[in-house]
Image: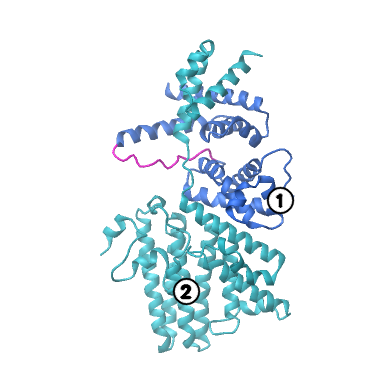
Amino acid sequence: MTEGQATERSDAELIALAQRGESEAFGELYRRYLDPIYRYIRVRVGENRLAEDLSEMVFLRSFESLGKYKERGHPFSAYLYRVARNLLVDHYRYRREELPLEQEPELPDAGVDVDGEVIRREKLRTVLAALQVLPQDHQEVIRLRVVLGLSTAEVADWMGRSEGAVRVLLHRALKSLREQLADVEE
Amino acid sequence: MSKSKQLAQVLDLCLAQVLSGAATVEDCLRDYPELAEQLGPLLRTALQAGDLLAPAAPTAAYRAASEARLLNRLRAAQVVERGERSRVIDRPARRRPFAWPGSPRAWKPAYALAGLALALALIGSGVGVAGAAAGSLPGDRLYGVKRGLEEVSLALSPTSAGDAGLLLGFAERRLAEAEALIQIGRDDDLPAALAGYERELGRLLAQEEHDQEGLSRLEAALEKHQQVLNRALESAAPQGRQAIERALERTNRGQDQVEEARQGQGPDRVPPGQLKRTPSAEGEDAGQPPGREKTKTPGPRPDATRGPKDRDQDP
């Protein structure tokens, strides 16, 4: 199978091929979904190398359990997301730590604007602290919809809710975040 | 529709427009003046969080290396599951487009699968080779099987932390083999065992160089290796001593590297595109320590894998 042919295939076709042992078909799925899965994990762990290792594990685990996978109206990315979430839970359980909220991400070098970078880091700490006290589903909808920029439909698929429920949840989550930030700033 | 649901819907709509760059917050507030008072703060909060927390996309180097690694592991896992000996043998050639021949890790599946194929063939014949191979030493007929099985376990390890643990185990196994060879008077085979030790150590250092927790483990392990080698030096025959001294020197250089890495070479110092988890194919082929270790050898160094600070610190 050439790459050109693979890119024309639907997820369902690639999954069927991968279920028959075609690792190249799974490679195409990997290329399609590495980016959102990596970015989701990266937001959660705040460390490049760990995010890289965990992202690879998501795809390995997904491949291992692909035989049991059935579409059931949800996209493959939602399946990968569930694997990623479970993996994060396992990872922190193994390390006997609380599942942390986002660690402080590694910010890019500020270059010449050192003051700007200091201010940015301070703002980042404030936002992280405010986010940390929100309920888990509020945190998650902010991560997916606002930080990763997924569409409402994608967030609904990933979180297993209706689009309407996601909109309402996002509204509540942003309101709570706003209130927390206001508290911190006061 | 309740006012709350209406606000949620408009917020979602505005957020989509603002995130895509199709509109500004002010545009949205102008479009929905009756909701502007509530919408404004929420949209600004969202933008602030999105801007500050947005993660970078995976690097191109990571994508390529990771995909090759993933596919290699999937194939290796399939082989193990199915025990398809014939496919084991022809797979590397058949899957050439995904073998990434130029990549530093391209040797790994071929080596691993060849070892596995041999092991399966021998085990299938009822000889119980795997167990026998486990106790083999350099120069023994089954030693290749032992090394091949090690590579299989490495290929199947899903994380770099797992790889590091295995590589450390392999290095210590090579040392144990060297001790055993001395005990039974096979000092002629010492260079092979200790070259293996140097090789595993090189791969391990390339793995661990940016991981502080790993560096601590490595530091403790290297100290232990030094003790083993010094002990071996006392009891080895003259023909084996040169290899032991070379291994000791390699261990010392490893300690220097660890020390240097601990003093301020965090993960961010990895130059873009460096495959920090994979040893250099060139180094492997030449029987030299791969990756960063190569840069520590005396003489002129094409030091592409190290940052400017590292070069400045060189004597």
Residue A58 in view here: no
In the image shown, does A31 or A177 lie closer to the viewer? A31
Gap in Å between the C-alphas at discs 1 and 2? 44 Å
Label 1: how many residues lie within 10 Å, few (<14), some (14-19) or many (20+)?
some
In the image, which lettered chain appears blue? A
* Residue B197 disc label: 2
Q: Quadrant of the C terminus of chain A?
A: top left
Chain letter behind tag 2: B
How far across and how far down the image is residue B312, in percent? Answer: 26, 58
Dot label at residue B90: none
Residue drawn at x 43%, y 77% as measured from the top left: B229
Q: Is residue A42 visible?
A: yes
Q: Nearer the viewer, mark 1 or mark 2?
A: 1
Q: Are marks 1 and 2 on the same chain?
A: no
Q: In the image, residue B230 lies at what x, y percent? A: 41, 77
Classed neighbour count for the residue bearing mark 2: other residues with Cα under 10 Å, few (<14), some (14–19), many (≥20): many
**Residue at 43% over, 34% down:** A125
Q: Secondary structure at mark 1?
A: helix
Q: Circle 2 — which element?
A: helix
- In magenta, the rendered stretch is A100-112
**Left of B21 or right of it: where is B263?**
left
| Picture quadrant of residue B303 | bottom left
Residue A18 image offset from top left, x and y in percent: 68, 54
Q: Quadrant of residue A163?
A: top right
Q: Is residue B148 left or right of residue B202?
A: right
Which chain is represented by cyan in the image?
B
x and y, in percent, of residue B50 in the image: 48, 31
Q: Which residue is mark 1?
A: A16
Q: Residue at x 58, y 73 (%)?
A: B148
Q: Is residue A104 magenta?
A: yes
Q: Chain of mark 1?
A: A
**What colouring method underlies this structural image?**
by chain
